[in-house]
Amino acid sequence: MPKQMPCPDNCNILLIGGGGREHALAWKIAQSQKLGTLYASDCSNGGIAALATPCPEQWDASRVFYMSRWCDQHDIHLIVVGPEVPLTEGITDELTTETRLVFGPSREAARIEGDKSYAKELMRQASIPTADSRTFTNYDAARGYLLRGLDRDLENEFKQPLAKEVTEFIEWCSEVEKKEFVFSDELLDILIHREDPCVVKACGLAAGKGVIVCNTVGEALDAVTLIMKDKAFGDAGNAIIIEEMMIGNEVSVLALVDGGTIWVLDLCQDHKQVGEGDEGPNTGGMGAFCPAPLLDEEMLNYVEREILVPAVDAMRRDGIEYRGVLYAGIMLTSAGPKVLEFNCRFGDPETQPLMARLQGDIVDILWRTASGTLDGADLDFSDDVACCVVMCSEGYPNSYEKGKPITGIEQFQGQDNTMIFQAGTNCTSDNLVTSGGRVLGVTALASTVDEAREIANSACKKIHFDGAFWRSDIGCRKNKKSDSATSVSGD
């Protein structure tokens, strides 16, 4: 357990990660009165490069000694970890010392994001409301589960006993024995298009894309094949979760946890799907706004009392002290709030509007969280609404080209109400070019979400790279209790 020690006045910080979330953190850290020198492990990002000194050592679980030695040589006091992968690999365990803190949970605590089956079991044991689900490590068993009860449904459809080959097919699905059958077109159509909404999730980390929403049995079967057989997400799909589809409004609840104190930040709403109106496949996030007026004080207290506190307490009972960000993706269903997923770090793109609105010294806040002294921190947010619109490369979230020159960013430097956070960019000797699917997080501040979105969309039109696209409807959802949206959360 790290010592409870005060934050030094000239705090040297190493930032791990090179995306839009990390640029937003670097931007806010650079404003701190407590900052000594800011170093960054990835300065290929042009925005981070303008704020930080490069660290030659990249995080690699096999090179812990070298990064630890570099931190010692440069008198690093605090390491701030953005992405989830280093946390699940144990960067906090390996680099925390008597004089150095790491902002982010331990390897064991980070399992709450890194292993969805572990998170589901933790929620079950702690009686945390979540979707009913089953976990599978066997491809055929998962397919058999999706086809459960098919004989009853088909008999109801045809109003007569099933043909022998269909009965045998269903038995094969249950017994996982390979047989071959010939189906009529009518039977095949029912097999594939029978409505049975569910969500199929890769249990491991899949960069926010390992969740597939399925409306029919056929779609679910295809999702299982894509994840488990085709290995679309690599080893992250060695195990999957099949869970009921939840309906309602989705909200991102991020809290700072110092092992005991839980400090809930202003609510955000992410927009996962690539297309306007929440159409198309999941992405890492196409935009977010904050604050999202989805929970009144009573319901927010319920989320803290029935979801966040039980999760932290359940880990503590297992000897795991949670320090860092605990991010709960919540679906506001007709039966009340239920957990879609837990993450062990700041969200991306939620961090961008959060940092744009955050008041107080971020270095002091991060230090207090890591040191177990969060109680009494100066943490507040501006009254403005922040809206982040993500500009993407053509083809995202599938394949896309890199190296497209980016122009127009410079006109927004120094503006109080518009911030351009770089994500998938690479700063070359000649210019700034695209290097990822999500390229820029164009973030605007205004008195209302509609005004902030209008400013952000207007800024997007003034920035150019070939094939750029974005969603112009961030924050346009009708977030009323009577309205509904399908569960689409990813990692």
Image (spheres, rainbow, N blue to C red):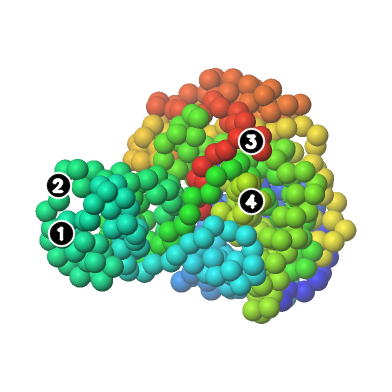
The amino acid on which the numbered mark 2 sits, given as a three-letter code, is Ser
What residue is disc 2 on? 184
Q: Residues within 10 Å of mark 1 (few under 14, many from 20)?
A: few
Q: Can residue 402 be seen in this snapshot? A: no
Give whichever of 438, 38 is nearer the camera: 438
The amino acid on which the numbered mark 1 sits, given as a three-letter code, is Glu
Q: Tell me which label, 3 or 2, sits earlier in the chain.
A: 2
What residue is disc 3 on? 482
Q: Tell me which label, 3 or 4, sits earlier in the chain.
A: 4
- Give SS at disc 4: loop
What residue is disc 4 on? 335
- Give SS at disc 2: loop
Give whichever of 86, 210 is nearer the camera: 210
Tag nearer the camera, 1 or 3: 1
CA distance for labels 1 and 4? 41 Å
Q: Which residue is drawn at 34% across and 59% down?
A: 149
Please give left or right for residue 447 compared with residue 15 in the image: right
Q: Residue at x 62, y 54 (%)?
A: 338
Q: Where is residue 324 in the image (x, y as percent from the top left)?
A: 68, 61
CA distance for labels 4 and 2? 41 Å
Q: Position of residue 133 (x, y in %)?
A: 48, 62
Q: Tell me which label, 1 or 2, sits earlier in the chain.
A: 1
CA distance for labels 1 and 2? 10 Å
What residue is disc 1 on? 165
Give whichever of 111, 190 is nearer the camera: 190
In the image, residue 266 sits, relative to residue 235, either above or below, namely above
- Give SS at disc 3: loop
Q: Residues within 10 Å of mark 2 (few under 14, many from 20)?
A: few
